[in-house]
Image (cartoon, helix red, strand yellow):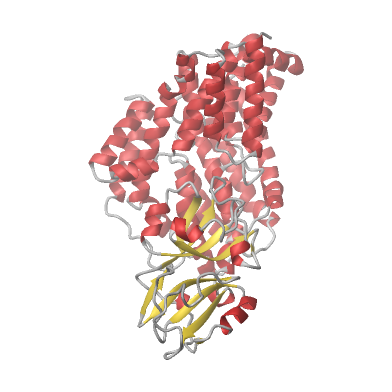
Amino acid sequence: MPWDAWITLATTVVAFVLMATTRIGPDMILLGAVVWLLTLGVIDTSDALAGFSNSGLFTVAFMYVLVASIRETGGIDLIIRYVLGRPRSETGAQLRLLLPVSAISAFLNNTPVVATYIPAVMSWSRRLGLSSHRFLMPLSFASILGGTCSLLGTSTNLVVNGLLNDRYPELSLGLFDIAWVGLPVAVVGLTYLLLAGRWLLPERPGAGQLFDNPREFTIEMEVAPNGPIVDKTVEEAGLRHLEGLFLVEIERDGNVVSVVGPGEKLKGGDRLVFAGTTEAAVELQQIRGLQPSSQGESSLNKDFRERRLVEAVVSDQCQFIGRRIREGHFRTLYGAAVLAVCRHGERVAGNLGQIRLQPADVLLLEVRPPFIERHRQSKDFLLISRVNGQARPIHERAWLAWSILGGVIALATFGVLSMLNAAMLGAALAVLTGCCSVSAAKRGLDTQVLLTIAASFGLGLALESSGAAASLANHALALAGGNPYLLLIGAYLLVALLTEVVTNNAAAVIAFPIVTASAESLGVSVMPYVIAIMFAASSSFLTPIGYQTNLMVYGPGGYRFSDFLRVGGVLNVLVGVVALTLIPRFWPF
């Protein structure tokens, strides 16, 4: 290989290692790799920026706006309300959950679908007397399986289709062409989850059950009416820097002061709610002017307009990962007080302020109402759901948002407009009809995914233009012995393994030039290999870190890494066997 091929290959390997072992965002790593190759002259400016003009990237962006319109109008909530109901058995409950989720995920990005379903499923399972642990992992897996049934199902499908159109204009895929394989894959996968998958999950409490009783992790005290701390601020009374406790709220005359600041003045009869361990209550008893609360019902069980209790799942991109809650000034940055932390299905014991946050930790937070909308799209949290208060009402425009999406699907399916044109028109209509505000459309764009896709194009072109892809293709052919079916299996396994440790989009885009070069060298059609890339990139069931929806359910479901290996490992094998059996039948070599 020439020197620039070696540089490109080394850069790609380093990028994959960094994505797998560090918390640096994949978009930053891949953009850095492209800048490095551009600086060394391996690629030119047009190659480095090629991803930003790809039709697949823009189709994904406009689909995000359509998904935002359905989320903003309550379109998914509407389905949840009428579909979940009150089944008579756990199997019936699984059917009511998995079938609609997989169907919706064939047309919508599955991340907002799962985000909307998680809080609904947790309250629904509680009403049914069933453990949410039995539903949340199947929820994520069903959304992934549904995404394999159409090109709209995942951003990866759209991106790979965009690559196919750019590289091989004579070849094309219809919106539902991959359903010939996707539907059998989804049927087999869902059948496995219904019949066997849930029995492989041991009974374990989820975060919702651990947060049910606030008295277990809060201490309530009262300010003595004529005590020495009356009319003093929180800081002056010595309540600001307690060793193992945080003052989170003050109940006063039927109202509440939430996320208490250091300058708040105390009044006689104030009811103070502290988060922390019961062992730390000794510290409070030594403060003159405080006495145990004589009121019966916990303050956190009451509904106040000025505060909300929410559960937030920590993202792997959260800036607080690895930092102690107290040292990171969590309350100051987010305007939220941490009441408890749940990890792997257990509440983290000990000094609350000394807990170091980890990805997928579930935090019980006390916040003011604006927090929910302000941080709903934050990269620091995968999911924010209310614990108390009324659910958001169904918007009267939900039917219109669904109709616009249906129109986009019809226009693309029947070839009236290209997929990009249809998505663009649908996004414009969603904004013009008020289904989605401009600000909501901007928030709905997942810039990290879009930048990751764009940068992946640059790295893929570098592999191709430098000759690295051709060299790797020759080695792949040698390993496959010139057998196209063995090459198909090898390509599928390569992408399936990569997608578990890096993003599915990066795995697909970077593998694309290598796999298609192998097919061209063998003199066979590239189509079966392109389809294999799509399905392998979506087959992320093995680990909670391989796919965002898996990470979203990891904390709330109280799962452990071994749960994904046990349930997802079998599902990975089943999906692979079905896909590799059917792909050559519909797209011959």
- Residue at x 68% of width, y 30% of height: 493
Horizontally, residue 380 falls left or right of residue 359, namely left
Asked if residue 377 is positioned above or below residue 300 in the image, the reply reads above
Residue 259 horizontal/vertical position (percent): 43, 67
**Observer-nearest of 191 and 47:** 47
Please identify the quadrant where the N terminus is shown.
top right
Asked if residue 260 is positioned above or below residue 3 in the image, the reply reads below
Residue 60 horizontal/vertical position (percent): 42, 33
**Observer-nearest of 455 and 521:** 455
Residue furthest bottom as drawn: 226
Q: How many marks?
A: 0
Please identify the quadrant where the C terminus is shown.
top right
- Whether residue 150 is visible: no
Asked if residue 234 is positioned above or below residue 369 in the image, the reply reads below
Residue 130 horizontal/vertical position (percent): 58, 66
| Quarter occupied by residue 546 | top right
**Observer-nearest of 496 and 453:** 453
Residue 176 horizontal/vertical position (percent): 46, 31
Horizontally, residue 415 falls left or right of residue 474, namely left
- Residue at x 31% of width, y 44% of height: 439
- Whether residue 489 is visible: yes
| Quarter occupied by residue 186 | top right
